[in-house]
Image (cartoon, helix red, strand yellow):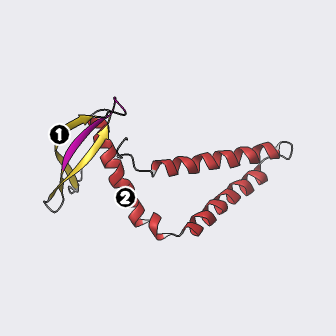
């Protein structure tokens, strides 16, 4: 098995307080050891420590992907890509199905494609936010 280089590691987590607005949420302060040997403290919010740490990891992945891909393409590029993907799906669907219920299939494809797009957009939202 190949050894992976350490990028970031949680070395200490400390419970801070329970949320007054959302009683089931807890606030932790996590100390991270970075790959260059420095440490940083980040707040982590979650229902338990594992949830809070998973939110910290999720946010770091989202920030890395945003910096690498999302921010480099303008909004018009994303709109064009969305319509191009939708047109490819509809063209492929129209050529492979019969003509009896084509309207139902097209509306279903549009709804499904929109739902998938919103799901991906939801994944890219930051999770480790202060619950006020």
x then y, percent, for residue 74: 53, 70
* Residue 2, magenta (yes or no): no
Q: Is residue 31 above or below residue 87?
A: above
Q: Nearer the viewer, mark 2 or mark 1?
A: 1
Q: Which mark is residue 81?
A: none
Q: Is residue 6 above or below residue 27?
A: below
State left or right for residue 88 relative to residue 63. right
Q: Is residue 24 magenta?
A: yes
Q: Quadrant of residue 29?
A: top left
Residue 19 occupies which quadrant of the picture? top left
The residue that appears at 32% across and 54% down in the rendered structure is 60
Cα–Cα span, label 2 and label 1: 24 Å
- Horizontal and vertical percent for residue 41? 19, 51
Q: From which residue to which does the magenta span run?
A: 22-31
Q: Is residue 112 visible?
A: yes
Q: Residue at x 32, y 42 (%)?
A: 54
Query: Which residue is labeled 1 in the image?
Result: 14
Q: Residue at x 13, y 60 (%)?
A: 37
Counting from the top left corner in percent of width and height, residue 118 is at 56, 49
- In the rendered structure, find residue 63 and report the number of the disc placed on it: 2
Please indicate whether residue 86 sits to the left or right of residue 68 in the image.
right
Residue 43 at what x, y percent from top left?
A: 25, 47
- Mark 1, Cα crowd under 10 Å, few <14 / some 14-19 / many 20+, is few
- If you read the primary sequence from the N terminus, does the residue marked by circle 2 or circle 1 appear first? 1
Q: Residue furthest right?
A: 100
Q: Quadrant of the C terminus?
A: top left
The mark tally for this picture is 2
């Amino acid at each position: 098995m190949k050894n992976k280089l350490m990028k970031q590691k949680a070395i200490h987590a400390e419970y801070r307080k329970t949320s007054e607005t959302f009683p089931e949420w807890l606030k932790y302060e996590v100390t991270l050891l970075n790959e260059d040997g420095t440490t940083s403290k980040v707040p982590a919010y979650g229902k338990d420590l594992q949830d809070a740490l998973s939110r910290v990891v999720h946010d770091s992945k989202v920030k890395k992907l945003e910096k690498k891909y999302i921010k480099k393409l303008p909004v018009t590029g994303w709109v064009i890509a969305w319509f191009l993907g939708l047109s490819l799906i509809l063209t492929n669907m129209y050529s492979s199905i019969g003509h009896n219920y084509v309207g139902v299939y097209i509306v279903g494809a549009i709804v499904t494609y929109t739902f998938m797009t919103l799901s991906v957009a939801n994944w890219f939202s930051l999770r480790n936010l202060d619950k006020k």
